[in-house]
Image: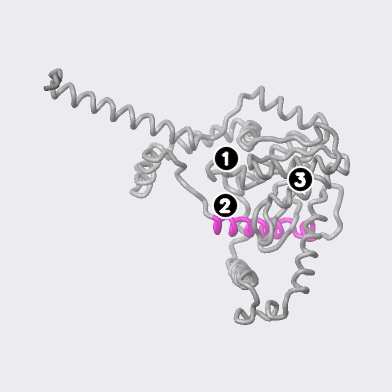
Amino acid sequence: MLYRPYTDPASRSATRVVFAVLCAHLSSASASCSTAWPTLPGSQCASAVRELTAVPTCLLVDANNVRGATAFRLTTGALVDLAEAWAHSNGLRGRVHLVWDHGCKPDALTSRGLEHGFAGPRQSADDMIAAQVPLLLKGGERVCVVTTDRELIFRAKHAAASSGAGRGALRLLGTRKFVAMLRHGREAAECAQEEASRFAIAQRASRWHERRRRKHARKSGAAPFAERTWQRVLLAERLRRAIRTREGGVANSGDPTAERSSLLRFAAAVGEDGEAAAEEAPPALIAGDPHRLATPRECGEWVRERQLESLERWLSHAGDVAQGLGAP
């Protein structure tokens, strides 16, 4: 018979309570760390900005990857506003390119010193960035790619090596560090306003769905919100239309100016290639008859085209473009 030391039931229950409290504290700490805003000391931010501005550098930013570094709490409008203020204060107007996934068609627009590239439905932002790197390097520019996507990093390095660029012509910058640099450049009044808003939200009574979200966040340690692909599709097209509406003739101009970079010419080339591919497609595909398509791939492309057309019609009648870029 095994000997078991006697323990008081009260002490056992107290131990269990302490253990449960400790586990809850660790899970909440991990959840808060996973959703915390990226921070960086001010000296490191200033040093990184000096390194970017010492030599004329073009920044190609994987916009949705940057938003993913903040668990998509950084909206498209907030990222655009931060990037505009940061580029203006550091003398990088016309050199910061925000490349977005999705959009109803490939497009490149200039707005308030920022270059916006939209990949369209047939390619991704990674494809645009990887194709743009060798073009800028051959033109004598130093390129900095802002991303943490391993595949994009590999493609950018391969493109730089194949273009024959010198050592150091391609730089890489992490998304969390980039967000910290953008937030470091804000004014103190904006920081105070954000802290006041955060305090006001923390003091009010939580609603049922907010309590439920916090409960699941404490249990899993995951981000409180996961943005879906269809939401990014709508946000990208809404941003593209808002820029075109706000900028007017500048956004619709066909003559590239000194401020606009080769992203405009690249997007135009992509659009021409897409139109040529549509002209070479089978007649059944152009006619829009799904029963006459030859392969499942062509059938899937037809379905996707119909979905994009319906999205185009819905956005044209939505009438919410005039709300501006500040909305999420």
User: Does 313 appear above or below 49?
Assistant: below
Q: Give the amino acid type for the residue marked by disc 1 in the picture.
A: Ala
Marks 2, 1: nearer the viewer: 1
Color encoding of the figure: one colour
Which residue is depicted at the point 62% across and 47% down?
64
Q: Give the amino acid type for the residue marked by disc 3 in the picture.
A: Gly
Q: Position of residue 18 (x, y in %)?
A: 27, 25
Mark 1 element type: loop
Mark 2 element type: loop
CA–CA distance between discs 3 and 1? 24 Å
Which residue is depicted at the point 49% across and 37% down?
35
Q: Residues within 10 Å of mark 2 (few under 14, many from 20)?
A: few
Q: Is residue 37 visible?
A: yes
Q: Position of residue 221 (x, y in %)?
A: 42, 38
User: Does 76 appear above or below 20?
Assistant: below
CA–CA distance between discs 2 and 1? 20 Å
Magenta part of the chain = 229-252
Which residue is depicted at the point 66% across and 61% down?
121
Question: Residue 113 — which label?
Answer: 3
Q: Position of residue 32 (x, y in %)?
A: 45, 34
Choose between 170 and 41: the one closer to the eye: 170
Residue picked out by circle 1: 69
